Image (cartoon, grey):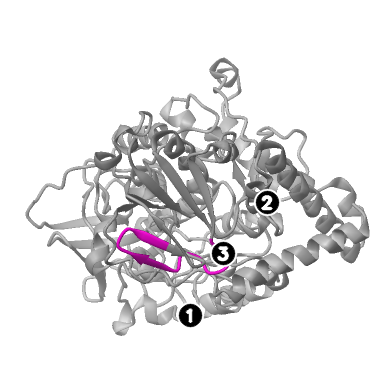
Amino acid sequence: MQVEDSQRLRDRYRAERDKRAQAGGRRDVADLTGPLERYLDDPHTPFRPRAGLRTEADVLVVGAGMSGLVTGARLRQAGLDDVMLVDAAGDVGGVWYWNRYPGARCDVESLIYLPFLEEVGTLPTERYATASEIRGYLTTLADHFGLRQRALFHTRVLGMTWHEHDAAWQVGTDRGDRIRARHVVIANGPLSMPKLPDVPGIKDMTCHSFHTSRWDYAYTGGGPDAPMTGLADKAVGVVGTGATAIQCVPALAESAAHLYIFQRTPSTVARRDNGPVDVAAVESWKPGWQWERVQNFSAVLNGLPVKQDLVGDGWTELYRDVLFRPEFSTLPPDQAREARTHADLRRMDGIRARVSATVRDQSVAELLKPYYDYFCKRPGFHDEYLEVFNRPDVTLVDAARGGLQEISGNRLRVDGSDYEVDCLVFATGFEWNTPYVHKIGFDPVGREGMSLGEKWRNGPRTLHGVMTNGFPNLFIIPLPNSQSVVTENFAHSIQENAGHIAHLIAATAGQGMAAVEVTAEAEDEWCRIILQRRRDDAAFLEACTPGRSNSEGHPELRSPLSSNFGGGVFEFFRLLADWRDEGSLPGLHLSPR
């Protein structure tokens, strides 16, 4: 790419960012209370009233999605049997319980995403599994480890308080339960609280509406794999064009009389190339193949040398092409950064060329072309999404200059124009940059009446991302930007962190200890390490269009403590393993029974 072409594109990137930033970016997140509380209702499983329980548990796991199930499995493997799960959903699965929208599937290869495949003894049918297959597998996983027997579903934790006199957490729920738990693991995943934009009129709209994580098949007809016959005479609007919209839009276009797609910022849409899992090949692999494959994938995405790219998909190709070309390692730092910038520009040129080659109306194609650095938004992969925009019954609405401005009855106003719909689908994802205690839905109260929300007001303070001083026997599966690490395959970090927590609980219980708590000194030291090792991505985030990664165009709002460990996943996991192997649990205060 010529220097002048590179400069022209950088100027275009800045213009696209400024256009969205000057318009104010996306509005604040709506508070899902009052008339909006219905967006949290469960359309999948009937609610059954029950009496409140008075019960005890050695370990209470809050959340029965992948984080909670893997934690439960690791606890079982560590010899801890008295494990209770509680979840607001009607069954296990977490985001895969809720996400039943048409076209829903995981964008990470199923052979590395679904944990414990070898232990459970089953294989997925597709390389990128559907939501229904993932949900079915997680149910099988829960039963394999005996985690559903004591699970409480359709049950929200409202609060929990540490009681010093009996060294236990007293946990209350919306079903009137009172649970005395020796240990608590908060395992709410990052995709747990639906996000709606705080648009004027959203509380009073008259059209039918729902969030994609609460898909209303009673209205649309059909099912995840069946035509939505109820939309044949309906004008449908979709707000959002991220990963969820990319997946559900093709089915909506097939079903609706007319589909309006409201787009603030286009996503990258690369080839997916899905296909069946070669069961015979997998069954010929040596034992331990899955963990080897998991680590191989993360190694490629961290630029570490591997003999072979075992997964070999769009993710590994992208990282290798943009960030970790072999020649980059031979260049001085400034030249390497420039080389990566040019590699990113070339890759994005390819994404835009795919749009031009697929969408016939070039004025529409131009709106679908992303102009930003590749990793400003989560990369998208799909083989049918772009074709949708060749249909005469699909309208792309450009909302770049102010987003969705107002909802009046069944009319949506964007850039001064009104669009009338019968049904509005919010494909707006999940809360990401809101405070941790808001995402989990309750605020734990630890020693001396200190709440976690108050303690973390200026950012998380932890040891290893999983414990915090003043909150004995409380463990957290860390979310992104929570003093741990993040991977594109979130299941990898879940398994490592859940294993670390299970070791902590088993080791201290085995020593006859009533309580374990990180010391203030160890917490301070870990925070110092996080601040020292955090990656300085301020310039990159400031250059991005407003979105999830940069707090809607305000990266300065994120506390420096809300950072990942900067050494990468393998250095972090080695650090945890070395800490466990040392044997004395350094940095923890143990209280005997």
CA neighbours of label 3 inside 10 A, class few (<14), some (14 to 19), many (20+): many
Q: Main secondary structure of the magenta part?
A: loop
User: For the residues marked 1 and 2, what is the alpha-carbon distance in whole angstroms?
Assistant: 54 Å
Dot 3 or dot 1, earlier in sequence: 1
Report the disc number at residue 520. 1
Dot 1 or dot 2, earlier in sequence: 2
Dot 3 or dot 2, earlier in sequence: 2
Does dot 3 land on a helix, a strand or a loop?
loop
Q: Is residue 56 above or below residue 142?
A: below
Q: Is residue 534 visible?
A: no
Q: Is residue 237 above or below residue 473?
A: above
Please state which of the two labelled residues, at mark 3 or mark 2, is closer to the viewer.
Answer: 2
Q: Which residue is mark 3?
A: 547
Q: Which residue is mark 2?
A: 366
Image coords of residue 563 (percent x, y): 59, 69
Along the viewing direction, whichever of 586 and 390 lies nearer the viewer: 390
Q: Residue furthest top?
A: 280
Residue at 54% in and 62% down: 399
User: For the residues marked 3 and 1, what is the alpha-carbon distance in whole angstroms?
Assistant: 35 Å
In the image, what residue type sits under mark 3?
Gly
CA neighbours of label 1 inside 10 A, class few (<14), some (14 to 19), many (20+): some
Along the viewing direction, whichever of 356 and 288 lies nearer the viewer: 356
In the image, what residue type sits under mark 1?
Ala
Residue at 38% in and 65% down: 439
Residue at 26% in and 54% down: 88
Does dot 1 land on a helix, a strand or a loop?
helix
| 415 sits left or right of 7 in the view | left
Image coords of residue 455 (percent x, y): 41, 81
